[in-house]
Image (tube, rainbow, N blue to C red):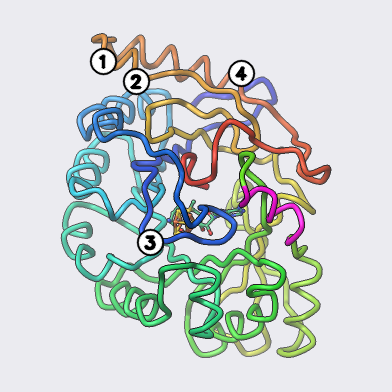
C-alpha cells in the first residue's frame, strides 16, 4: 500500500478515458464544447493497462472509468477487460450519463464491469434537458432499466445540485429511495477552469445543508447511516421507511481531504494529483518512450508523495488549467 505525506493510503485510481461528451451539462461543458484531445493523444487500452498494472503493484485496488463520457469510446470494453484482469484489482466501475449505456452494458458486464454510477440531475423532463443539455429524461430512465436488467445493482444515481436549474428537484430524486433500493447522491457544485461553466458554478452553489433542509421538510428526517469505509466521499442517510440510501457529497461546505484515497489519470495521460489543484505528472510521455513498469511505479509513487491536501473552494478558487470534463470528477 502507498501512503502520502499526510498518511493517507491511496488505493483508488479514477481514469478519464475520453474528454468528449454527448451532453453539455450547464456546469461542465459550454454548448460550443471545449478544445478536445485528438484521438491519437488519448491513452490506448494497452497503455491504460500498463498504468493499472503499475498502480496495482503499489497497492491500488479500485478503478473507476469516467470522462467526458466513457461510453463514447469504441474500445471501452477492451479497457474494462484489460484493467479488470490485472492481478490485485478488485473492482472496475464506471460513471456515465447513461445515454448510450443500454447499447453497451451487456458487453461491458461480460468484460468485467462491476458497478455503474448514473448521472441524473432531475426527474422533470423540461428541467432535465435544461440542465443536462442535449440529454432527455427518457434516456435516463432507459439507463436505469438497463442497469437493473444487467444486475449491476444497486442503481446509483448522482445529481449535481445547481441553483435555478434543479435545486427543487432534490425532493423528487430523494423520494426515489422510498420505493427503490437505490442510492441517490447529491453533489455540491464546484467551479473548474476559467470558462462560462466555472463562472456559473461560482454563483449557483447549493450547499448540502440547504438540500437536506428541503428534503426533510418534504419527506421526513434523514437518519444518518454509518460509513462503510472512511474514504467514502458521501455521507449517507435513510428516509423514514425507505429502501434506498440518500447521500451527500460536500466538497465545498465539508471538505473531506483528510480521508482522500484517490489518484486521477486524465484522458491525455497525466496523473492529476488532486481534483481541486493543477499539479500533474506526465505518464503518456513515459508510456510512449518505452518506460518499464518500475519507471511507471516510480512516477506513481512520486505522484502520491506530492499529493496536496486542502483546497480553497469556499473562496471560489479551484483548478484553472483543466475543465471537469478532462479530469472526470
Ligand atoms: N459523463 C459522465 C457523467 O456525467 O457521469 C462522467 C464524467 S462527469 C465529469 C463525472 C461526475 O462529475 C458527474 O457525476 C457529474 O455530475 C460531476 N460533475 C461535473 N461537473 C461538476 C461540477 N462542476 N461540480 C460538481 N460535480 C460535477
Ligand atoms: Fe458530459 Fe458528464 Fe460533463 Fe455532463 S457532467 S457534460 S454528461 S462529462
Residue 116, label in figure: 3
Q: Is residue 89 above or below residue 297?
A: below
Q: CA distance from mark 2 to mark 4?
A: 19 Å
Q: Nearer the viewer, mark 4 or mark 1?
A: 1
Q: CA distance from mark 3 to mark 1?
A: 31 Å
Instruction: Report the predominant secondary structure element of the magenta stretch.
Output: helix
Q: Is residue 243 above or below residue 56?
A: below
SS class, disc 1: helix
Q: Which residues are magenta?
A: 196-204
Q: Position of residue 272 (x, y in %)?
A: 52, 29
Asked whether the beta carbons under mark 4 and mark 1 sit within 8 Å of each other, the answer is: no
Residue at numbered disc 2 = 284
Q: Is residue 297 above or below residue 196?
A: above
Residue 288, label in figure: 1
Residue at numbered disc 4 = 306
Label 2 CB less than 8 angstroms from ligand 1: no
Q: CA distance from mark 2 to mark 3?
A: 27 Å
Question: Mark 2 or mark 3, which has the lower sequence index?
Answer: 3
Q: Nearer the viewer, mark 2 or mark 3?
A: 2
Amino acid at each position: 500500500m502507498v501512503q502520502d505525506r499526510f498518511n493517507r493510503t491511496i488505493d483508488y485510481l479514477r481514469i478519464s478515458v475520453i474528454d468528449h461528451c454527448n451532453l453539455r451539462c450547464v456546469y461542465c461543458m459550454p454548448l460550443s464544447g471545449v478544445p478536445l484531445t485528438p484521438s491519437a493523444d488519448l491513452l490506448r487500452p494497452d497503455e491504460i493497462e500498463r498504468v493499472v498494472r503499475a498502480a496495482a503493484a503499489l497497492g491500488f485496488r479500485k478503478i473507476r472509468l469516467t470522462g467526458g463520457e466513457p461510453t463514447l469510446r469504441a474500445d471501452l470494453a477492451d479497457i474494462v477487460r484489460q484493467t479488470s484482469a490485472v492481478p490485485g484489482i478488485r473492482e472496475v466501475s464506471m460513471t456515465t450519463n447513461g445515454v448510450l449505456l443500454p447499447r453497451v452494458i451487456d458487453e461491458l458486464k461480460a468484460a468485467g464491469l462491476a458497478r455503474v454510477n448514473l448521472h441524473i440531475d432531475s426527474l422533470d423532463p423540461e428541467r432535465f434537458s435544461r440542465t443536462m443539455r442535449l440529454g432527455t429524461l427518457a434516456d435516463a430512465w432507459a439507463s436505469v432499466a438497463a442497469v437493473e436488467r444487467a444486475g449491476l445493482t444497486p442503481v446509483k444515481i448522482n445529481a449535481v445540485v445547481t441553483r435555478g436549474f434543479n435545486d427543487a428537484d432534490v425532493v423528487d430524486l430523494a423520494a426515489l429511495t422510498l420505493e427503490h433500493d437505490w442510492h441517490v447522491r447529491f453533489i455540491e457544485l464546484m467551479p473548474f477552469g476559467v470558462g462560462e461553466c466555472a463562472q456559473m458554478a461560482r454563483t449557483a452553489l447549493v450547499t448540502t445543508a440547504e438540500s437536506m433542509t428541503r428534503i426533510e421538510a418534504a419527506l421526513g428526517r434523514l437518519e444518518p447511516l454509518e460509513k462503510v469505509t472512511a474514504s467514502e466521499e458521501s455521507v449517507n442517510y435513510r428516509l423514514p421507511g425507505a429502501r434506498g440510501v440518500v447521500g451527500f457529497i460536500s466538497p465545498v461546505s465539508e471538505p473531506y481531504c483528510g480521508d482522500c484515497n484517490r489518484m486521477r489519470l486524465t484522458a491525455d495521460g497525466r496523473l492529476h494529483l488532486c481534483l481541486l489543484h493543477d499539479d500533474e505528472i506526465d505518464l503518456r510521455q513515459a508510456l510512449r518512450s518505452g518506460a518499464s513498469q518500475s519507471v511507471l511505479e516510480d512516477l506513481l509513487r512520486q505522484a502520491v508523495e506530492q499529493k496536496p491536501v486542502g483546497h480553497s473552494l469556499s473562496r471560489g478558487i479551484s483548478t484553472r488549467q483543466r475543465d471537469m470534463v478532462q479530469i472526470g470528477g
